[in-house]
Amino acid sequence: MKKLFNGIYYGKTVLVTGHTGFKGSWLSLWLQKLGANVIGYALDPPTQPNHFSLLNLEIESIIADIRDKAKIENVIQKYQPEIVFHLAAQPLVRDSYIYPHETYETNIMGTVNLFEAARKSDRLRAILNITSDKCYENKEWVWGYRENDPMGGYDPYSSSKGCSELITSAYRRSFFANAEYGKSHQVLVASCRAGNVIGGGDWAKDRLIPDIVKATAAGETVIIRNPHATRPWQHVLDPLYGYLLLGQKLLEGKPEYAEAWNFGPHDNHILTVESLLKLFKQHWNDIKYQIENKKKQFHEAALLKLDVSKATSKLKLNSVWNSEKTIEKTVQWYKDFYQYAEINSDNDLNNFIKYIM
């Protein structure tokens, strides 16, 4: 495990903002296995149960708000991380309609706070800002969005992620320019846009897989709002592999990788919500669902795809687990949790790594 990514993370101090969330907890687990000294910075876990608490990781966990500029500056000065994975965010579309001010404050000014703190660090070498596939101005085209397509977003969440990308680009060009790397600064900055991630340990509200799991565990019928919505579903370990691979390139001092990246499956693994449900039911027959016919309360995009040819070409990155394997692993994680109180995250990670070794 510690030889993965050329052993670049072994002994490194790594800051993960948003470490108590779904993706952040999986990333912290993997980094710990790689031998990194992981510093987590986030709010308390948003749900009970939650993946972070179940993992019981041996990391430095700081419970704080990314909107607290002085606090994040103090943490970076105290621990002196060499790389930052920035995942702290208000991550839900529906909550952004209810709490737009909090969404913008967290996702926009939280990003600014991180970059301002980074400018004061002498030891930092790389920053990866993890945003979202929803950062693009979505015209619901049948082809995928490329990294140089316009930012946008219909709802407060999506537009806040578009703003976070623009902030990343502005700080890279203004303070961490690739052409000046090794001269006036030592930090390489990249941003990552991933599609819909699924996997064990997600209990967030208003997300498809947690809604299915919670209803099934309670013997209830899950209500499906948007059965024909098409999304680039992928197992959570797939984009994390991309983040870690990209982080390796930045830590190796390769400025040609300090730019924006899409991570996601190719077109043959993009499914509608209803297709995903049917595959889930093949592995867990107890699942019961009902299509909601009421008018949608909030706008939700029907089609969203990413063009991942850049990551495929330059990083030699392809999805490790296809949609069938992703669904199989996700269902099994939850079944083992609810039926046997087992946490399969270590096993899933070890199994995933066998595919990439």
Image: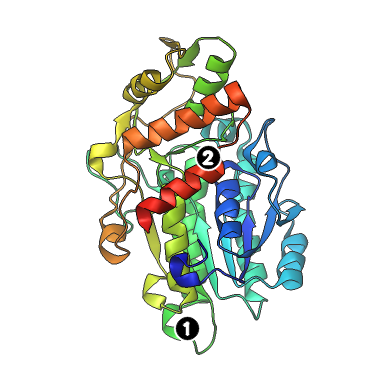
Q: Earlier in the sequence, mark 2 or mark 1?
A: 2
Q: Residue furthest bottom?
A: 183
Separation (CA) of disc 2 from disc 1:
34 Å
Residue 126 numbered mark, or none:
none
Residue 181 numbered mark, or none:
1
What residue did someone put label 2 on?
A: 156
Give percent across and percent down for residue 149: 31, 54
Res. 142 image quadrant: top left
Give percent across and percent down for residue 95: 59, 32
Left or right of 235 in this view: 33: right
Render colour scheme? rainbow
Instruction: Specify the amino acid type for callout 2.
Output: Pro
Tell me if mark 1 has few (under 14), some (14-19) or many (20+) residues whose alpha carbon lies within 10 angstroms of its own: some
In this view, 143 is above or below 193: above
Whether residue 352 appears in this view of the structure is yes
Name the residue nearer the viewer: 326 or 154.
326
Instruction: Specify the amino acid type for callout 1.
Output: Tyr
Which residue is pictured at 55% across the width and 27% down the height? 336
Whether residue 206 appears in this view of the structure is no
Which residue is pictured at 43% across the width and 38% down the height? 154
Give percent across and percent down for residue 249: 42, 71
Instruction: For the C terminus, give its image quadrant.
Output: bottom left
Name the residue nearer the viewer: 70 or 357.
357
Q: Nearer the viewer, mark 2 or mark 1?
A: 1
In this view, 166 is above or below 301: below
In this view, 12 is above or below 316: below
- Secondary structure beneath dot 1 equals loop
In this view, 96 is above or below 242: above
Name the residue nearer the viewer: 110 or 124.
124
Tell me if mark 2 has few (under 14), some (14-19) or many (20+) residues whose alpha carbon lies within 10 angstroms of its own: many
Give percent across and percent down for residue 63: 76, 50
